[in-house]
Every structure is written in structure tokens, then in C-alpha cells.
Amino acid sequence: MSIVKAVLLFCCITLLFRCSDAPLAGNGTGTDIGEAKVSGCVKLPGGIAAENVTVTLRKQDYVPFSVSPKDQKKVVSGKNGSFAITQPGKGYYLLELINRDSLCAIKRFYISGNDTGVMVGDCMIDTPALFTGRVFKDGTPASGASLLVLGIDNEGTIQNDGFFSMRLPRGEQLLRVMINDQYSTRDVLFSNDNSGDTIHSYSTPVTVLEDFENRDGLNALTTLLGGGSWWAFTDSVNGGKSRILPTAEPGLVEAIDSTSNAYRGGSLHCQFQIDQSFNASFALIGVDFSNSKDSNSSKSWFDLSKMTAFTFMAKGSGTIYVQFTCRPFGSSTEYPVYEIPVNLTSGWNECTIRSSDIPNALLTSSAQIISWQSGNSAVSNINFLAKSTADVWLDDLIIVGLNASDFLN
């Protein structure tokens, strides 16, 4: 079996059987999405049930202050802290909880067209946390720019030195840097744990897919999209003996190096030992954007048609092949894979793959050639494949041309 066929087979198996980590569950009634219900329980610190808490459900994919009342659903928690919101519809949602003592909480999740019930579990409300940091645009303080909090009605102004300070619900918030209240330079997931960090925005929108600084095996969009992780695959599925060291376990956490050899904070370091005696030898690591946008098929497809380039920091030895895996084209059941070779060097270098340079994909089952322009509207994951022995370091995977909120559409 060829490498391409093996990779396509694996992609097919993965997409068919992977389950999402998002809190989604059907109730088995056979009802449609119009009867869906979001339910949960509000808790105070210490696990005490909290009544009379205002629970607001909003779509995530909007700029603050533009959402209309018809796109918000509000209820008040009962004596045991429980709440239920019916008929939310398909999409990405943000759940905001606020009580009169200024305690609050935020939850994010996705509802597919097949879900009839979404249990978000216990929602722990607490005092808002202080979010602080600095914002730079193209290397200089973004003085006077606005910092919007997507999903909740809150915004702040960036000071002359680029400093900002806002009190927000604990956890990760999606912040948008706005220049002159019109031009968005970057959307970034920022938590109270990041307080004091610098947000770098650019004239061109960018999305950080992964920086490995959390050492959790997930990608940087996981909080926003409800899933998405690192994984590995080798020719062992066909009888080969290629290996990925130090680990091929899901998440690749043991491969995240935070020593001085890392580019910044932490970097992924994998050694690909390829079985050269095997006629279709390979090994690869990959990252999903999201484990699932659909609870039944476990497929997740995202529109990268606005992507102008994919950049990442890399070093090592040998050659790796960057792959973009896309949804089957037309009537085909084969997943197009767009593949670009990258030669590694001993020192850290920024590798740039321009969208205009991505070659065509070939469907081996039909010899059909698919251009990147035809497949880029439905991309599920990005892989790094080795066909011969290689030592690979990766960091700061960035998608140029898209903001993080573009993935919510």
C-alpha cells in the first residue's frame, strides 16, 4: 500500500470514529434540533447551589454590542441551581452566568445539527479576575486601540504604552484588537493565567494554531472550538516498523520540550525512525482543528480559503512533508491531501508555505487532480510526515489571513 493511500485510510478511520471532548449528548428521543435543550447547574465556590443567577446563551460568532435580543436567550437558575434553555439551534455558543453579587462564569461549546440535548454540567461562578497585559501592533504599542471581548458586552481601551487592564470572568476569553473601531488586527484567546503577557497583532490577521506553551496536547483553538488535539500514525498499520520518539501516544505531551533547546516556552520535538526495509515506509504527526463539529460523523471541516500562508518555526535534520487534509471532493470518498516538502536545518528558521504555492492533490482512486482552491474551504487537520529518518522541532504554527473567530463560521 502506498504512503498516500495509507494516510488517506487513516484520515478516513480517524474522521469516522473520533469523538469530541465537547459536552454534547443526544437524548435519543429522535426529536430534531428545534427541540434541543441546554441544561446545567450553577454552583458557588465550595459546591453550593446558586439560585437566582441570570444565565444568558449567545451565539459566539459576533462582535460585541451587535447581537440582537432575538439571538440571546435568558433564564434564571432555580433553588437547586439548575437551569434549562430550549431551542438554541445549531452553532457555537457562549454561556454567561451573572448574579447580583458580581459573581460570574463563562462556558463555550458547539451544538451540531444532530444534538437534541446538551448538558454543560456544573458552572462554577466566582469573582471576576483581573486580565492585564500589553498589545503591540507591528512591533509598537497599539495606543488608543480598542480591546473587545467577543461574546460578552465588554471592551477596554489600550493605553499609550500598550497596557490594558480588564476584570472578566475567569478562564479563557476571546479578545479582539480593533484599530479605529473598524479594523480588526487579531483575535486571541487570553486567560487570567496569561496576565502580564504581550499580545502581538499585525496588519494582516493571524491565528495561532499552536505554540505548545500549555503542554496539554491540545491545539490553541481547542477552548474556542470544543476540541482538537495532536496525534501520531505510522506504517505499522500495514506491517512496517517505523517509530516516533519519544512518544506516539495521543496528545504527544511527552514530546513537548521546555528546555533551552525550545524556540520559546515549549516546542514539539519528535524523532522519526523510518523502517527503510518496508516498501511504503512513513510516520507522521498531526493536529486536528477540532475533534468534531458533528456529533454523529465526527468530522470537522474549516474554511481556510482566506489563508494566505501557513508559517511555523522549525529546526532539525532531514525532510518533512506538510500536509493539509480536506473533505472528499464531489462524489469521491477519498480525502484530498495537499503535500509540501520542507528541508530542515540545524538552527531555528521560520518556514512559510504560501497558499499560492500549495500544489494540487491527486485522488489515487480516480487520478483526479484537485487544486488547493477547490479543496481549501473544508480542511480538517495539518500533518507533518516523514518518509525517511528525520529529527523535527516545531513551534508557533500560525495561519495567516484568518482571525480565530473565522473558525466559528
Image (cartoon, rainbow, N blue to C red):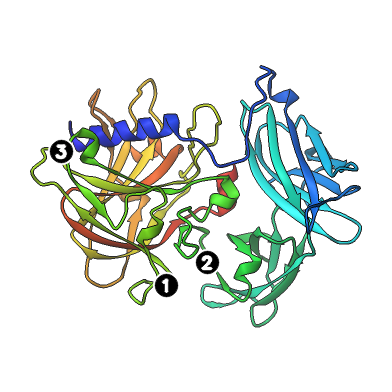
Q: Which amino acid, mark 2?
A: Tyr
- Left/right placement of residue 210 relative to residue 47 reads left
Q: Nearer the viewer, mark 1 or mark 2?
A: 1
Circle 3 residue = 280
Q: Secondary structure at mark 3?
A: loop
Q: Residues within 10 Å of mark 1 (few under 14, many from 20)?
A: some
Q: Quadrant of the C terminus?
A: top right
- Left/right placement of residue 325 relative to residue 60 reads left
First in sequence: mark 1 or mark 3?
1
**Residue 382 percent location from the top left of the image:** 38, 47
Q: Which amino acid, mark 3?
A: Ala
Residue at 80 percent across and 35 percent down: it is: 85
Q: Secondary structure at mark 1?
A: loop
Circle 2 residue = 202
Q: Residue 278, located in which quarter of the rendered image?
A: top left
**Which label was assigned to residue 231?**
none
